[in-house]
Amino acid sequence: MTNLRIIELKIKAIKQYLAILGKYRKYSQKKITADDTLRGAVERYLYLAVQASLDLAEAVIAYKKIGTPETYQELFEILKNAKLIKKDLAEKLKKMAGFRNILAHDYAKLDYDLVYIFLKDGLIDIKQFINVIQKKIY
């Protein structure tokens, strides 16, 4: 499978996760936190959307042969330095990478204010990221 095909598959997966998450945006924070099933679904699909975005960044870097990142945050620094994304988007995506680590490792201490903010506002950053990548790669 070519790197370009991997990029296409990651974008497709991200769009699917964002569509699913869009259905959960109608719920209040109180409703999500009170319902174990709803809360688990939101957490899982946020994790998947963020992880797929990180995978997309890795695939773009490999495709363009522009670096070897050592951390998730460094993915977006490399993309910024290669002028594939702007500084403000890179900073937002670095925070998203940190959020992914919380979802994956610190779920017992998960701050639902942060989860809800990301559900309401952070998805826009992911959409912007895939739009920029589609324009720059194709």
Image: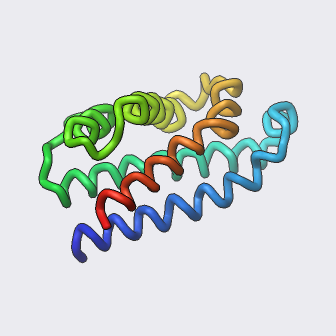
- Locate residue 103: give its quadrant: top right
Residue drawn 29% across and 46% down? 84
What is the quadrant of residue 94 in the picture? top left
Q: Is residue 13 above or below residue 67?
A: below
Q: Position of residue 69 (x, y in %)?
A: 20, 39
Q: Locate residue 56: give its quadrant.
A: bottom left
**134 is higher (above) or lower (below) than 70:** below
Check the picture and name the quadrant holding the C terminus. Answer: bottom left
Which of the two residues, 20 or 103, is positioned nearer the viewer here? 20
> Horizontal placement of 70 versus 26: left or right?
left
Q: Relative to 80, does residue 84 appear above or below in the rendering?
A: below
> In the rendered view, how is the structure colored?
rainbow
Viewed as shown, does residue 78 lie left or right of 109? left
Task: Answer with left or right where residue 105 lies relative to residue 107.
Answer: left
Residue 15 x, y percent position in the rendering: 55, 61
Q: Residue at x 85, y 31 (%)?
A: 30
Q: Position of residue 28 (x, y in %)?
A: 85, 37
Q: With respect to residue 117, does 123 lie above or below?
A: below
Q: Nearer the viewer, residue 128 or 53?
A: 128
